[in-house]
Amino acid sequence: MSKYALVTGATSGIGRAYAERLAAEGYDLVVVGRRRERLEEFAAAHPDVTVRVLAADLSTAEGIDAVAAVCATEPLTMLVNNAGVAHYMPLADLPAAKATELVDVKVLAPTLLTRAVVAGMIERGEGTIVNVAGMIAFSGPAPHAQMPRRAVYGGSLAYSVAMSQTLAAELEGTGVTVQVVCPGVVATEFHTVQGLDLSAVPRMSAEDVVTASLRGLELGEVVCAPGVEDAGLLDAVFRADLEVFGAQSPELASRYR
Ligand SMILES: NC(=O)c1ccc[n+]([C@@H]2O[C@H](COP(=O)([O-])OP(=O)(O)OC[C@H]3O[C@@H](n4cnc5c(N)ncnc54)[C@H](OP(=O)(O)O)[C@@H]3O)[C@@H](O)[C@H]2O)c1
């Protein structure tokens, strides 16, 4: 089967790096983002593969529907759910429209695009779904001084991790693979579009994130953490998750009596 990927958020940063790498590996592509001119520039720069430009706003129902329709009808071998916004600010200050946009782009769109693509992948017995989350997914227990002002963003990444793990298990034996990628701080436009200057913070390149993701797929990793040297730490987190999950009982825990 020919290699054929759809990448959301392909106009910059990590998504652009996925699109570049996959094109270099001979994938035909559907590139998605709001900035059509950047998508067209990408297509023009990659004449050796077929690149379809799909300008869509994934914070709208119409945008999600348009991309989902492509996911449901094209024989994609890979879906990269990468588009994202962060809107770091205290929840009380976060305008409802920005909270909605964040959840639409980071939670609803990946859910509906994955749902749209997965039936065809199962039928073809082949496919890869990559969800780009981030290490902030694991920052829930961090104190205020370390990780303030990003409850909705953090929650959206944790959703992505839990959904990817659960779906990976559901798809065992089908030939369809699911991976969630959890980078730390990456040098992209992500922070500058929010007016933040993180140039003084050590940052990974978007290219390294993609290298980790593709190698992680070869290693069979469901959770890929490009900047975590000790993969045993992740295993320990998931073992602890399973221990707590298995420790539940219908009896009221004694500390609540
Ligand atoms: N940079 C980091 O430090 C970091 C760390 C961990 C995880 N991540 C995750 O990595 C992913 C990619 O971010 P990045 O760092 O590459 O940032 P970026 O350079 O700002 O790229 C974000 C991409 O998302 C697209 N996008 C945003 N809103 C959209 C919408 N409503 N509809 C369609 N596309 C939309 C943008 O395209 P248009 O503007 O053209 O629509 C752009 O291509 C995000 O999901 C983020 O959560 C980033």
Image: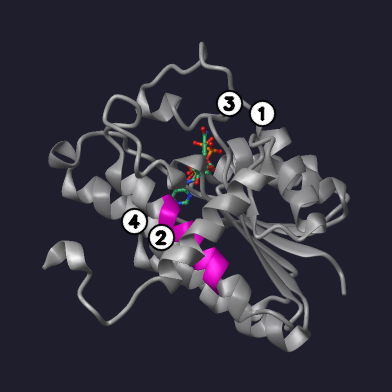
Q: Which residue is mark 4?
A: 103
Q: Is the C-beta separation of discs 2 and 4 under 8 Å? A: yes
| Secondary-structure class at tag 2 | helix
Q: Amino acid at mark 1?
A: Ser
Which numbered disc, 2 or 3, marks the residue that appears first in the sequence? Answer: 2
Q: Residue at x 42, y 59 (%)?
A: 159
The Cα–Cα distance between marks 4 and 3, rounded to whole angstroms, is 23 Å
Q: Is the C-beta separation of discs 1 and 3 under 8 Å? A: yes
Q: Which residue is mark 2?
A: 107
The Cα–Cα distance between marks 1 and 4, rounded to whole angstroms, is 25 Å
Q: Nearer the viewer, residue 69 or 15?
A: 15
Q: Position of residue 66 (x, y in %)?
A: 49, 69
Q: Ligand 1: does it lie within 8 Å of the C-beta at label 2?
A: no
The C terminus, quarter of image: bottom left
Q: Is the C-beta separation of discs 2 and 3 under 8 Å? A: no
Using the image, tell me which numbered label, if any, was put on residue 187: 3
Using the image, tell me which numbered label, if any, was put on residue 205: 1
Q: Position of residue 242 (x, y in %)?
A: 50, 66
Q: Ligand 1: does it lie within 8 Å of the C-beta at label 3?
A: yes
Task: Determine whether, in the image, residue 220 is placed left or right of residue 40.
Answer: right
Which numbered disc, 1 or 4, marks the residue that appears first in the sequence? Answer: 4
Q: Amino acid at mark 4?
A: Val
Task: Determine whether, in the image, residue 59 is placed left or right of residue 179.
Answer: left
- Residue 95, picture quadrant: top left
Which numbered disc, 2 or 1, marks the residue that appears first in the sequence? Answer: 2
Q: Magenta segment, which residues?
A: 157-166
